[in-house]
């Protein structure tokens, strides 16, 4: 069942920067760009390009895992807009968003994206309905190859499938426009970062 009302969706946790405006479960406007590290420069202008400058009844924001900087950019914007508009803010996972976009999925699949330091962020999902099988983990491709799902999707799929020597890899990016495919419980996460591993930066001793 479609969620009622208007949702502003923000995705900045991956190499993509995307926003969408969804009304009663239907995407009425969306923008998607692969920006690498340029989220801070592009996000607010992209929201401003949406109808009504993106004004919505609720804000959904990608909490990760993914880029530490990108996650912070998205959360800061979502919280500021939520405060200014007086509307609630909730989170979702980048990996569930990627999983939701798979056409004709098998009963289970895995999502893998780059996690830095040669590691991947990986999570396994059931697809009917979409639900995580286990928590997301971070590992090098040869260690992540323990998973049994034949289909692996996401920017790190090829590395994982190559390390395992079997299965199908499909490249895919997180896209805010696919939010309507996520069940309610997967878009109701607390709006705080899903980091999986500790940030690289450390405070000085």
Image: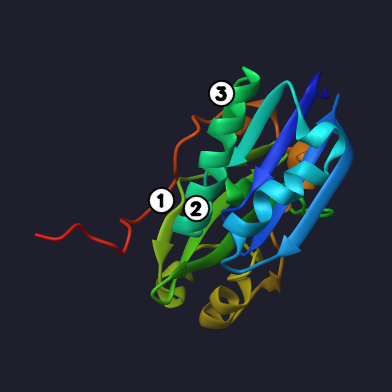
Q: Is residue 123 above or below residue 22?
A: below
Q: Residues within 10 Å of mark 1 (few under 14, many from 20)?
A: some
Give the residue at mark 2.
Answer: 65
Which quadrant would residue 77 be assigned to in this image?
A: top right
Q: Residue at x 82, y 22 (%)?
A: 1
| Residue 130 numbered mark, or none | none
Q: Which residue is more in the foreground, 22 or 48?
A: 48
Pick whichever of labels 2 and 1 is earlier in the sequence: 2
Q: Quadrant of the C terminus?
A: bottom left
Residue located farthest toward the left when viewing the structure as drawn? 205
Q: Residue at x 44, y 43 (%)?
A: 193
Horizontally, residue 65 falls left or right of residue 104, namely left
| Residue 83 numbered mark, or none | 3
| Residue 195 numbered mark, or none | 1
Does the image show residue 174? Answer: no
Q: Residue at x 58, y 55 (%)?
A: 40
Q: CA distance from mark 2 to mark 1?
A: 5 Å
């Amino acid at each position: 069942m479609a969620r009622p009302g208007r949702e502003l969706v923000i995705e900045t946790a991956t190499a993509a920067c995307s926003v969408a405006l969804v009304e009663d479960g239907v995407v009425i406007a969306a923008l998607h760009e692969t920006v690498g590290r340029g989220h801070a420069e592009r996000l607010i202008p992209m929201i401003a390009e949406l109808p009504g400058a993106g004004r919505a009844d609720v804000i959904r924001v990608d909490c990760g895992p993914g880029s530490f900087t990108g996650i912070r950019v998205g959360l800061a914007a979502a919280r500021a807009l939520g405060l200014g508009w007086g509307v609630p803010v909730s989170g979702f996972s980048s990996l569930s968003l990627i999983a939701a976009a798979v056409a004709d999925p098998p009963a289970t699949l895995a999502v893998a994206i780059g996690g830095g330091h040669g590691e991947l962020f990986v999570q396994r999902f059931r697809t009917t309905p979409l639900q995580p099988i286990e928590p997301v983990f971070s590992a090098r491709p040869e260690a992540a190859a323990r998973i049994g799902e034949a289909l692996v999707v996401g920017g790190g799929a090829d590395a994982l499938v190559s390390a395992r020597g079997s299965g199908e890899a499909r490249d895919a990016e997180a896209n805010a426009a696919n939010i309507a495919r996520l069940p309610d419980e997967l878009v109701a996460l607390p709006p705080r970062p899903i980091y999986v591993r500790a940030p690289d930066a450390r405070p000085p001793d």
